């Protein structure tokens, strides 16, 4: 069972977690959000970490789903319906960040992918702290591979919504743990995360 949410530390106040979970999962062959991973739906793992380190959590989906409603009863987050999600990950990102860009009290955004069950809270916190210190977007990197979650300060939300991570101006933060780059694309990938 996912860990219960703890109260955010002062350094995490105002951080909004965004879990992008509206993909079609064509390579997986089914709706992978509900595939079992360590006894929980795959999506539960990203939501758990987001809830652990963020004040508020949004989850982007393409359409309402009773399974999501049941999951959010245990792991409260605000569902954002993004009918344009079929256009790809960028459409889901824009949909969520448009909701946040002008919100009062937002100190930053942490963008998770719903199919990455091994992101550790400690790495998410490092990204938030680096973002606060440098005032620019921060992306984790493991063995030269860029990963998620991506931390975005308030002044960059519009840019990241429209263009994605600014590789030239953003910061890459080295992470030793591979959870920041390991996702689930095919059913066989679930065994990696057992």
Image (cartoon, rainbow, N blue to C red):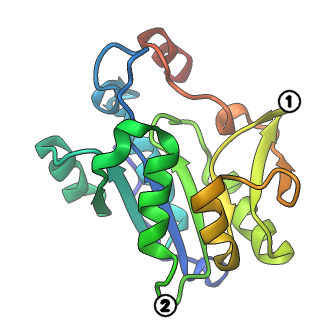
Residue drawn where x is 15% and y is 44% of the image: 65
Residue drawn where x is 34% and y is 47% of the image: 84
Q: Residues within 10 Å of mark 2 (few under 14, many from 20)?
A: few
Q: How far across and down, in percent of the image, does residue 117 sit?
A: 50, 36
Residue 34 in view (yes/no): yes
Asked whether 103 or 47 is in front, the reply is: 103
- Hey, which quadrant is residue 177 in on the image? top right
Q: Earlier in the sequence, mark 2 or mark 1?
A: 2
Secondary structure at badge 2 equals: loop
Q: Nearer the viewer, mark 2 or mark 1?
A: 2
Residue drawn where x is 51% and y is 15% of the image: 189
Q: Residues within 10 Å of mark 1 (few under 14, many from 20)?
A: few
Which residue has dot 1 on it? Answer: 143
Which residue has dot 2 on it? Answer: 104
Q: In the rendered view, would you say 48 is above or below 119?
A: below
- Measured in 3D between alpha carbons, the distance from the residue under mark 2 to the one under mark 1, in whole angstroms, is 37 Å
Q: In the rendered view, would you say 1 is above or below 139?
A: above
Residue drawn where x is 54% and y is 50% of the image: 112
Asked whether 182 or 8 is in front, the reply is: 182
Q: In the rendered view, would you say 111 is above or below 179?
A: below
Horizontal relation, residue 42 to residue 139: left or right:
left
Residue 51 in view (yes/no): no
Secondary structure at badge 1 equals: loop
- Hey, which quadrant is residue 67 in on the image? top left
Horizontal relation, residue 59 to residue 125: left or right:
left
Position of the N terminus by quadrant: top left
Q: How far across and down, in percent of the image, does residue 154 sit?
A: 64, 78
Q: How far across and down, in percent of the image, does residue 47 sit?
A: 41, 51
């Amino acid at each position: 069972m996912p860990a219960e949410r703890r109260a955010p530390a002062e350094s995490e106040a105002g951080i909004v977690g965004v879990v992008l979970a509206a993909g079609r999962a064509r390579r997986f062959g089914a709706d992978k959000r509900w595939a079992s991973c360590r006894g929980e739906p795959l999506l539960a793992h990203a939501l758990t970490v987001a809830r652990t380190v963020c004040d508020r959590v949004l989850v982007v989906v393409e359409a309402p789903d009773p399974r999501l409603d049941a999951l959010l009863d245990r792991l409260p987050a605000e569902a954002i319906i993004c009918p344009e999600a079929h256009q790809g990950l960028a459409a889901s990102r824009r949909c969520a960040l448009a909701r946040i860009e002008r919100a009062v009290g937002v100190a930053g955004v942490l963008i998770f992918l719903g199919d990455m069950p091994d992101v550790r809270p400690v790495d998410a916190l490092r990204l938030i702290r680096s973002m606060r210190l440098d005032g620019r977007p921060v992306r984790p990197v493991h063995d030269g591979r860029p990963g998620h979650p991506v931390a975005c300060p308030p002044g960059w939300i519009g840019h990241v919504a429209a263009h994605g991570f600014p590789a030239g101006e953003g910061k890459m933060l080295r992470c030793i743990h591979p959870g920041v780059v390991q996702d689930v694309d095919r059913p066989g990938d679930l065994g990696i995360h057992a």
